């Protein structure tokens, strides 16, 4: 009774009397003599004492049919089938009949009765006390007042497919039956006035378990729905018990004489005899209906009724049938209305439980949690409020809660909320920042470590943001741990190198990174590391630019090698790292060209510059010679850029390198000019001798150079003139440049002039000799031509000039004295009128003549266009572009020299005369 009084009472139902909808509020009246009732399949089924069965539809339409001749005692309407099972009497005496009705089929206007059989299996007369049917239509149990239970197994709608047996025997009346189906296991609860039993029907022996030695009165037992685990309810006078198939469950101390117990849609309906007395009179005849919510532990409704027949559920409402013919409707209030009633009483916990049991959506639950949290916050219960706010995460905007707890005195509550926000992975960068700031404000290192050292699967925050906040707050060790654990390499190095100045650890960490990340970080921090740890940094760069293998765990190295068998950075890109460390840079570059001779030109150029710097600053002659050889060896490797190397050698006045590069680039004039600038006369002459064959103008430039010198250079001038004279490199008039030299006398050029005049005289004599020869040959040819014109030609050749075989008729003879077999001539001759032997020579002569004619025509046309054009330069450029002036003739004799001017003409004439003679 104490437990009962502690349960709060509410009015979650609206009570009303059922009235006809179209009859001005006239109350609906039940048929007389109702003895049994049930509901399901869209109607309420009533049985009366006259054997009639009434079907009440939703619009209060009543239909009936005669089911028994005498009376109806029990009804059972299946919820999943339109099957109605009834128990009644067709004759006087104790002989109850069971009838099975198919309400969807008709027989003479009444539902079809598919089966009739006696309820009593033997001849022992007894009354039926209770009835239960399984929803699968394979089981039906009938309880009797003598304590026995008859089980019908098989298709209950047909006689042939079922069998009947006595399942339970006793001497105490059976007051309740209920089937329980969970998965494939079927149980039957049997309750008497004194005991509660459970049978397992899916096992052949039907094992029985006695659950309790407390029974209940007739109609005071029921079965909960599957949401309550299908528990069996037994309402005793002192308590209400709930049972599982193998044990007794919870017990509720609801005192009072129970008249009826029903379970509908999560509520327990109890009819209890009212024991309260009226003022000034005896006990009331009313009966108390109480609706219990066993899950949430409250009374949903309570009211007095007159002599209740039964309570049924249909059409979304509950109906209370009373003996006075009235039918009362109990309509449950909607969930929101019930919640508002609870909110007004500040019963938030009960509201939450109710919302869950009503399957309210998450948004609705979140709103309840928010209101509950606001209520606790206003009461000053900040700890309780934050717990409710935590339950709104995912629905309620976090800023709503955060603003309430920004006060420093409530930072613990704010921390708890932010932790929950992170656990659900709903925190953004601002939330992470705020949480870490809370930890730092509280100086709570333990929680901070727990937060950042959580496992990978438990990380619910933005790691990068956490690192930033910890760094700003000065928690460098925590930030470093977080960066290393989650492989934020850039942040790890930034903190180690910029904040902690731990350069050795930073360098070690870079050496453990994969190739791509190690390369990028060395480009970023290389200068800093080189400044503080030059040797270690140089060593790492050497490995990075050759064949990089990260240091550390052997397994990690093996996996790295499998993914990247060969990694090599561009060595030239790291040269700027050594900006202030030339010694390390030189060692680095020498290592690179030693390991990889095909290194980029930038590597060789930089190394050359370093070696030249060392050479220029070295004072020890022996060491300087070694450095000179090293620089020259680098130049001879052909890996440097010519222009850059030349500029470097000139900048450092590296004579050997400059001369080598000039020679390598065939810049012979530059070599000679270099010696001229340094006034090394013998080197000037030596350069002319060495490179004069490739570039003949060197001798002329040397002569002009010495001609401008006021020193006594007679020996060099004589040597240059001798070579010029020997190779006929320049005309004698150009020797007048020596007139500018005050030290050069006539004796210097005496030998040159004598030799020149002698050669020209000899040339004149040779030309005159050739003229006489050509004239003689011309006269001879003319006489031969005249002879051919005036006398017969006798052909005395005996062999063919083509195959060198004896001539045979037919044969072909030419005036040039060549003879051929006719078949040889036809095979080799290109033209019938031309000798095949003389044809090549004749063709050369004709080509020369045509070329002379073309040159003559081209010269004339050029002169005409040049005279008539307004822009003479464009005419010259046009002909120059066509290559007319490509072939240049160098005249070594002065203009007007007769022998030289007639040389080409004489040569052409000589060729023509010889050709004609052969023909």
Image (cartoon, helix red, strand yellow):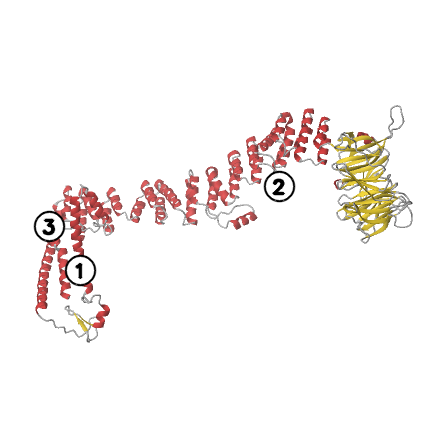
The 10 Å Cα crowd at callout 3, few under 14, some 14 to 19, many 20 or more, is few
| Looking at the image, residue 51 lies above or below residue 891 | above
**Residue extending farthest top:** 280
Q: Residue at x 13, y 65 (%)?
A: 917
Q: Is residue 266 left or right of residue 627?
A: right
Which residue is nearer to you in this view: 718 or 483? Answer: 483
Q: Position of residue 335 (x, y in %)?
A: 71, 32
Query: Where's residue 39, x and y in %?
Result: 78, 40
With 286 as the anchor, is 354 left or right in this view?
Answer: left
Crowding at dot 2, Cα within 10 Å, few <14 / some 14-19 / many 20+, comes out as few
Q: Residue at x 51, y 42 (%)?
A: 510
Residue bearing the label numbered 1: 846
Q: Which mark is residue 896?
A: 3
Q: Residue at x 82, y 35 (%)?
A: 30
Q: Is residue 391 visible?
A: no
Earlier in the chain: of badge 1 and badge 3, it is 1
């Amino acid at each position: 009774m104490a437990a009962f009084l502690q349960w709060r009472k509410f009015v979650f139902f609206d009570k009303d009397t059922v009235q006809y909808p179209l009859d001005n509020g006239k109350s609906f009246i039940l048929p007389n003599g109702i003895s049994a009732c049930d509901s399901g399949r869209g109607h309420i089924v009533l049985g009366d004492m006259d054997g009639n069965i009434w079907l009440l539809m939703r619009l209060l339409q009543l239909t009936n049919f005669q089911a028994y001749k005498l009376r109806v005692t029990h009804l059972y309407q299946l919820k999943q089938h339109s099957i109605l099972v009834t128990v009644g009497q067709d004759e006087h005496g104790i002989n109850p009949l069971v009838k099975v009705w198919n309400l969807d089929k008709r027989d003479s206007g009444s539902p079809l009765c598919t089966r009739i059989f006696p309820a009593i299996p033997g001849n022992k007369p007894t009354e039926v006390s209770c009835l239960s049917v399984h929803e699968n239509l394979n089981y039906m149990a009938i309880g009797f007042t003598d304590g026995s239970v008859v089980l019908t197994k098989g298709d209950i709608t047909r006689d042939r497919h079922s069998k009947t047996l006595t399942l339970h025997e006793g001497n105490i009346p059976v007051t309740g039956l209920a089937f329980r189906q969970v998965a494939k296991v079927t149980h039957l609860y049997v309750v008497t006035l004194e005991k509660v039993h459970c049978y397992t029907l899916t096992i052949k022996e039907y094992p029985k378990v006695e659950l309790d030695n407390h029974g209940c009165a007739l109609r005071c037992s029921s079965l909960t729905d599957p949401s309550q685990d299908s528990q069996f309810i037994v309402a005793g006078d002192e308590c209400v018990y709930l049972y599982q198939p193998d044990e007794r469950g919870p017990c509720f101390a609801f005192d009072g004489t129970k008249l009826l117990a029903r379970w509908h849609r999560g509520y327990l309906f109890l009819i209890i005899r009212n024991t309260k007395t009226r003022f000034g009179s005896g006990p009331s005849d009313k009966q108390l209906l109480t609706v219990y919510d066993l899950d949430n532990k409250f009374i949903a409704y309570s009211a007095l009724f007159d002599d209740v027949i039964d309570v049924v559920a249909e059409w979304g409402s509950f109906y209370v049938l009373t003996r006075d013919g009235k039918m009362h409707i109990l309509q449950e209030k909607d969930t929101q209305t019930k919640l508002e009633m609870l909110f007004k009483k500040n019963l938030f916990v009960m509201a939450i439980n109710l919302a869950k049991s009503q399957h309210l959506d998450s948004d609705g639950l979140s709103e309840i949690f928010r209101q509950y949290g606001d209520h606790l916050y206003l009461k000053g219960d900040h700890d309780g409020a934050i717990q409710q706010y935590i339950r709104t995460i995912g629905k309620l905007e976090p800023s709503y809660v955060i603003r309430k707890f920004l006060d420093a005195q409530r930072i613990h509550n704010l921390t708890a909320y932010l932790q929950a926000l992170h656990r659900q992975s709903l925190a953004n960068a601002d939330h992470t920042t705020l949480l870490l700031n809370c930890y730092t404000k509280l100086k709570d290192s333990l929680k901070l470590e727990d937060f950042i050292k959580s496992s990978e699967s438990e990380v619910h925050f933005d790691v990068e943001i956490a690192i930033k906040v910890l760094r700003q707050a000065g928690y460098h060790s925590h930030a470093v741990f977080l960066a290393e654990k989650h492989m934020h390499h850039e942040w790890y190095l930034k903190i180690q190198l910029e904040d902690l100045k731990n350069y050795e650890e930073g360098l070690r960490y870079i050496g453990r990174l994969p190739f791509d990340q190690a390369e990028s970080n060395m480009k970023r921090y290389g200068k800093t590391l080189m400044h503080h740890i030059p040797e270690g940094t140089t060593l790492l760069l050497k490995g990075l630019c050759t064949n990089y293998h990260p240091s550390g765990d052997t397994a990690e190295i093996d996996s790295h090698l499998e993914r990247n068998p060969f990694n090599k950075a561009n060595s030239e890109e790291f040269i700027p790292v050594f900006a202030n460390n030339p010694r390390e840079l030189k060692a680095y570059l020498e290592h690179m060209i030693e390991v990889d001779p095909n290194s980029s030109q930038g590597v060789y150029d930089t190394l050359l510059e370093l070696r030249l710097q060392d050479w220029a600053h070295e004072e020890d002659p022996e060491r300087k010679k070694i450095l000179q050889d090293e620089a020259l060896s680098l130049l001879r490797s052909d890996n440097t850029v010519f222009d850059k190397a030349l500029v470097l050698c000139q900048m450092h006045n590296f004579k050997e390198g400059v001369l080598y590069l000039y020679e390598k680039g065939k810049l012979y004039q530059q070599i000679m000019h270099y010696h001229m600038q340094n006034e090394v006369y013998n080197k000037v002459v030596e350069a002319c001798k060495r490179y004069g064959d490739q570039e003949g103008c060197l001798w002329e430039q040397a002569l002009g150079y010495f001609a401008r010198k006021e020193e006594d250079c007679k020996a060099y001038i004589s040597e240059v003139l001798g070579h010029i004279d020997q190779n006929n490199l320049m005309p004698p008039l150009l020797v007048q440049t020596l007139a500018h030299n005050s030290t050069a006398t006539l004796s210097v050029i005496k030998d040159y002039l004598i030799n020149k005049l002698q050669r020209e005289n000899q040339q004149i004599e040779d030309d005159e000799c050739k003229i006489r020869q050509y004239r003689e040959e011309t006269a001879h040819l003319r006489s031969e031509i005249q002879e051919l014109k005036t006398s017969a030609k006798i052909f005395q050749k005996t062999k063919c000039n083509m195959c060198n075989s004896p001539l045979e008729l037919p044969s072909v003879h030419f005036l040039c004295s060549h003879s051929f077999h006719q078949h040889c001539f036809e095979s080799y001759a290109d033209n019938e009128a031309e000798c095949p032997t003389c044809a090549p020579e004749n063709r050369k002569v004709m080509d020369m003549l045509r070329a002379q004619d073309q040159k003559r025509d081209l010269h004339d046309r050029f002169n005409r266009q040049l005279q008539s054009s307004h822009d003479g330069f464009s005419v010259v450029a046009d002909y120059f572009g066509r290559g007319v002036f490509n072939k240049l003739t160098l005249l070594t004799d002065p203009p007007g020299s007769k022998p030289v001017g007639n040389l080409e003409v004489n040569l052409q004439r000589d060729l023509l005369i010889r050709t004609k003679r052969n023909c």
